[in-house]
Amino acid sequence: MGVSVISVVIALLAVVSSASSTAPWQAKPKVDVISGEWDTVLTSQDNTAQITLKLKLEGAKVTGTSESSHLGDGAISNGSWANNMLKITVDTRHGPLALTGSLRNGKLIGDWDMGNMQGKWEAKKKTPEAKGAKEATSANQNGVVNEIDSPAGAGSGDPNLSVGPDGRVFLSWLDPIRLKGYALKFAVRSRGDAWSKPRTITQGETRFDSSILALPDGSLSAHWLTKSGPGMHANDVNLSISRDGGRTWGEAIVPHQDRTPAARGFVSMIPANGGIAIVWLNGRKMTGGDPGAAGHGSAEKARAGASQHTGGADHQHTGGDHRAAGHGPTASEMGMSLMYRMIGMDGTLGKEVLLDDRVCECCQTSAAPTLDGMAVVYRDRSEREVRDISIVRLKNGQWSEPQPLSKDGWEIQGCPVNGPAISSAGQNLAVAWFTAAKDQPRVYAALSSDGGATFGPPILVGDENPIGRVDVIALPSGNALVSWVDRMPDGPEVRARVVRPDGSKAPAIVVAETSSGVPRMKMSGDEVIIAWTDSRNIIRVHTATLRMTGN
């Protein structure tokens, strides 16, 4: 009796077991927590890179693709998911990227390895709603680059932009002339229209390094350099004013009171107090008036200097003592100086002011208005040849002492010909710059919400292989749009991206696939105008628009 009962029980269990194995609707299915798109951040010391992983799980095998403006797009191979452990290899333009990690609280977290570099990574899965919202946001932030016909001719270069009080955009550039030399020209564009017919501001055998400035009363100002002596860098700064929209131009005004044959240039102009505030570099204290003669490196040497830079911890300014930090008489004996002057609309010259008596010899300056004055950024220079970015501010009629804006510690013997850029929108200021400290080329930005009194920590904008040549637009929201040039396998590439005070960044977009010189940007309404020199085949200034909404 007992044996038969046991036999029945065993038979029933066998039936149940068989039913369980043959009835899949009764089994608990495995949940696929891996398939989908993952927003991924790779970190290594102070550097970060963003990548989107598109994963697909089939059994224990993981395949998919990756997308990254930094690493490029690639396939995913050697992927596996077992025991809560993910292992994949991502194909990037820099080589294979090995990722290992586990799922913790809904995030994939682990380590990455590229052979000569390692670090940590973290990924968060996109939900369909979040994905759609992010794509819409990116579209608003980055917009679409639309090239528009440029008025500049073949061989043109040195583009600059300015926005008038009515929102019209002014473009200036240098065109070669048939005999010898260049003509400084400009054109105007209203939103949605084509560029106007070009007009000539000045022309001659020596015309170079120029810009245009639209003033609040509708007047225009333009600057250019001319040779002042036999030295390679002996130049004079010239400025002219037009009171009739550029139909006629006044006689050239020379802002510097000394007329010795010396290196001058890298001019910045902004409207101020009903006139024009002008900032420039002056090399009258350098040996022979020529930075090359003084042994501080020519532009040609500096362009090769990217392979010569070494790290350093020194900086030009410490504390409030300007001279104690390397700007005293000994340091400035052969130094390039940063100068400032006000010019009235009638050509009256204000007092010439020395802002810094030892700065980098051939890096661009940049100036922006603030609610109580103006701010100027430039590449400084210490006695140890550390060339980081400094700022001076004019507040209520008083200039501050130079203060370090960056502490990169870029020690380089020749000028890198790579200055910073600054822009303002009310109390919001944005500064962008290039550095190659510790042999690591980087583009950074720093943002301020108090007119430049303080800045947030530097934001890494580009670290793929940047050449620099930055520009920046401060946005009313406190964000900023930064442009720079990257060195790509097929040649230089102009890129741009939005950065935010919290350190986050929008994906980078490609503005142009080639560039020489410094690309320029200005904003009118919600439209950004970009100008750059195309260096392929026929060298020529090109222009494009970029919509910026929701920023």
Image: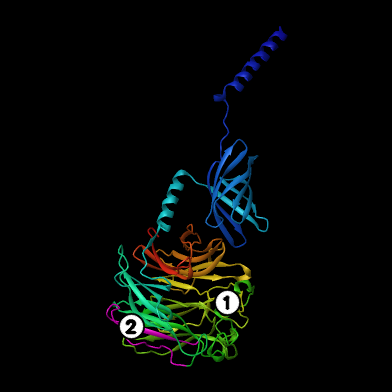
Which residue in the protein does label 2 denote?
241
Q: Residue at x 51, y 62 (%)?
A: 503
Q: As drawn, which residue projects farthest toward the top?
A: 1
Q: Earlier in the sequence, mark 2 or mark 1?
A: 2
Q: Are marks 2 and 1 in contact (CB under 8 Å)?
A: no
- The x and y percentages for residue 201 are 34, 80
For numbered disc 1, what is the local secondary structure? helix
Image: magenta residue range: 234-259
Q: Which residue is mark 1?
A: 302
What secondary structure prevails in the magenta region? Answer: loop
Above-or-below relation of 425 to 320: above
- Judging depth in this view, the residue of 168 and 107 nearest the camera is 168
Secondary structure beneath dot 2 equals strand
Query: For mark 1, does the 10 Å Cα neighbourhood hold few (<14), some (14 to 19), or many (20 or more) residues?
Result: many
- Checking the image for residue 203, the label placed there is none
Looking at the picture, which amino acid does disc 2 mark? Ile
Q: Quadrant of the N terminus?
A: top right
| Amino acid on which the number 1 mark rests in the picture | Ala
Residue 187 lies in what quarter of the image?
Answer: bottom left
